[in-house]
């Protein structure tokens, strides 16, 4: 340094200090170098990187920004600046840096990951899919793509993406945990539990995997297997609602009522409007022979979740024990109604599965008959009613299909599949305005539903709302750039614009 007091020497010494985590020495050295050469891109970049690495994220911005101004084509300053801005929740500015980095290196996995996370934070799941689907993905990008599929309502695509990645890297706990979460969302708890059991046997310190596995063990009643995991996770996260609640459930089931009471009360303090800890605290207080306390907690449980049949049933038992016979009878009646409704739902599932098999085999009349029986048994099950509508479509009975779809949407107006199908039925009958409204509701409920976006764009085009049609079509093509129907519609819209342009002759 004494022999060569120049920018290169200061940058080398500053980097040496930074590599050894001596961040303040590195900062002092780099700032001394900048007094000699304030427009050194490398010194500015290293100063920003060192400040960021040393926890001075806000202070790192200015030297990093200056380094990008001095050399806009240098990749690393954009990457670190984007990371710092994202950490400070300045997503719009972070996005600009990731995009600048991708202009320099379109294959940068760091920039792709950063931009994807910015878009996911903004709910732009379709554009993330479009960005990453054909990219050369590492593990981070695979998880980003799977998460975008997941949040966009495409769970099957999400699981396929993760399974393909696991075939290449079967020991990855991050991929395994993400796939288990998707299985849980697909109501495949047994599959998720099996996957996690095998993974945790090989990776016993995978905390995230344990967090997913614990509620699955509790749900299946495997309390002895759940207990050591619950204790370990509670030590790591003593203020986590779910961990406190699950410890309370396990302790209640094991007869350790005092411990259960303490953990359930802590859980309630964190989430007082959650019905479940009130319900289990009520059961625990019953075990401690505190009937008035149990009554209060079970009252709160049924008020917060009136559909909880067990809470009504247990409240009835407590009310009888304190002499409130009329109130107990009313709670018993409600519990019985809820139990019957649940039994009906469980009963219709095999019938619906049989109907689906008949439909797949071409026996449309047999499928309709079975679906009708299922709907009679569970008239408020939107999924079963919707399947009956599809059977009517196979039979060519448009009036029955329309009526059944309307029935489905009275039960569940947010069902995007039914909204889209009803829009399709209405468009075939020439009722384009109503069809367009249902297509619009479909994409509102499921923003990643490509077919609904295409149908919505087509309906808007028929109504001569061409600018809106093009926007809707753009959404469809972001989700699926190779969608044949969308590409045909795009060509038609371009022809319509050409026909309306000045000087065009028919």
Image: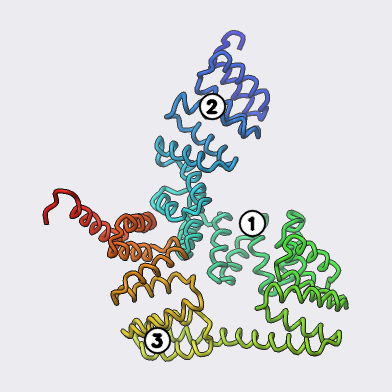
Whichever of callouts 2 and 1 sits on the residue coming sooner in the sequence is 2
The answer to whether residue 486 is seen in the rendering is yes
Q: Which mark is residue 184?
A: none
Q: Position of residue 87 (x, y in %)?
A: 59, 41
The quadrant holding residue 433 is bottom left
Q: CA distance from mark 2 to mark 1?
A: 35 Å
Q: Residue at x 81, y 84 (%)?
A: 319
Estimate how packed mark 1 is, as few (under 14), some (14 to 19) or many (20 or more) residues with alpha carbons within 10 Å. Answer: few
Residue that protrudes farthest toward the right in the picture: 289
- Residue 23 lies left or right of residue 150; in this view the side is right
Q: How many marks?
A: 3
Whichever of callouts 2 and 3 sits on the residue coming sooner in the sequence is 2
Q: Position of residue 123 (x, y in %)?
A: 50, 54
The structure's colour scheme is rainbow
Residue position for label 3: 358
User: CB of mark 2 within 8 Å of CB of mark 1?
Assistant: no
Q: Helix or strand or loop: what does disc 3 sit on?
A: helix
Residue position for label 2: 45
Q: Residue at x 62, y 27 (%)?
A: 18
Residue that protrudes farthest toward the top in the picture: 3
Q: CA distance from mark 2 to mark 3?
A: 67 Å
Residue position for label 1: 208
> In which quadrant is the C terminus drawn?
bottom left
Q: Residue at x 35, y 84 (%)?
A: 399
Depicted 305 relative to depicted 71: above or below: below
Q: Helix or strand or loop: what does disc 2 sit on?
A: helix
The quadrant holding residue 306 is bottom right
Q: Position of residue 460 (x, y in %)?
A: 32, 63
Q: Residue at x 41, y 42 (%)?
A: 107
Whichever of callouts 1 and 3 sits on the residue coming sooner in the sequence is 1
Q: Helix or strand or loop: what does disc 1 sit on?
A: helix
């Amino acid at each position: 340094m004494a022999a060569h007091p120049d920018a290169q020497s200061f940058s080398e010494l500053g980097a040496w200090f930074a590599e050894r985590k001596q961040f303040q020495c590195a900062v002092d050295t780099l700032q001394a170098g900048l007094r000699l050469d304030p427009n050194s891109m490398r010194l500015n970049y290293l100063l920003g990187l060192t400040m960021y690495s040393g926890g001075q994220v806000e202070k790192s911005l200015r030297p990093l920004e200056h380094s990008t101004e001095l050399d806009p084509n240098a990749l690393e300053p954009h990457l670190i600046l984007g990371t710092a801005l994202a950490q400070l929740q300045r997503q719009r500015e972070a996005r600009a840096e990731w995009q600048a980095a991708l202009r320099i290196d379109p294959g940068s996995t760091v920039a792709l990951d950063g931009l994807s996370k910015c878009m996911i934070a903004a709910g732009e799941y379709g554009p993330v899919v479009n960005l990453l689907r054909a990219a050369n993905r590492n593990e981070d990008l695979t998880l980003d793509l799977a998460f975008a599929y997941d949040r966009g309502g495409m769970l099957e695509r999400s699981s396929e993406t993760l399974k393909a990645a696991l075939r290449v890297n079967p020991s990855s706990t991050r991929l395994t945990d993400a796939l288990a979460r998707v299985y849980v969302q697909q109501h495949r708890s047994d599959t998720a539990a099996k996957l996690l059991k095998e993974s945790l046997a090989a990776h016993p310190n995978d905390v995230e995997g344990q967090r997913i596995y614990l509620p699955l063990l509790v749900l299946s009643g495997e309390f002895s297997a759940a207990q050591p995991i619950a204790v370990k996770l509670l030590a790591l996260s003593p203020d986590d609602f779910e961990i406190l609640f699950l410890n309370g459930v396990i302790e209640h089931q094991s007869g350790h009522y005092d411990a259960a009471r303490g953990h359930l009360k802590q859980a309630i303090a964190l989430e007082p409007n959650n019905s479940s800890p009130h319900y289990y605290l009520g059961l625990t207080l019953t075990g401690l022979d505190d009937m008035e306390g149990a009554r209060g907690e079970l009252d709160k449980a049924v008020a917060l979740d009136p559909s909880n049949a067990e809470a009504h049933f247990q409240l009835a038992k407590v009310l009888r024990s304190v002499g409130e016979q009329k109130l107990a009878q009313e709670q018993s009646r409600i519990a019985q109604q809820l139990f019957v409704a649940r039994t009906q739902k469980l009963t219709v599932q095999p019938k619906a599965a049989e109907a689906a098999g008949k439909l797949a085999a071409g026996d449309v009349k047999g499928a309709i008959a079975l679906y009708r029986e299922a709907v009679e048994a569970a008239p408020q099950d939107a999924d079963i009613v919707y399947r009956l509508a599809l059977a009517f479509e196979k039979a060519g009975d448009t009036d029955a299909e329309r009526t059944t779809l309307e029935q489905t949407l009275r039960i569940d107006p947010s069902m995007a599949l039914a909204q889209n199908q009803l829009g399709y039925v209405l468009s075939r009958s020439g009722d384009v305005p109503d069809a367009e409204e249902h297509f619009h509701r479909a994409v509102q409920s499921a923003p990643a539903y490509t077919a609904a976006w295409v149908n919505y764009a087509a309906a808007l085009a028929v109504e001569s709302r061409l600018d809106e049609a093009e926007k809707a079509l753009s959404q469809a093509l972001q989700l699926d750039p190779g969608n044949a129907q969308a590409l045909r519609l795009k060509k038609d819209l371009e022809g319509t614009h050409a026909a309306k342009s000045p000087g065009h002759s028919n």
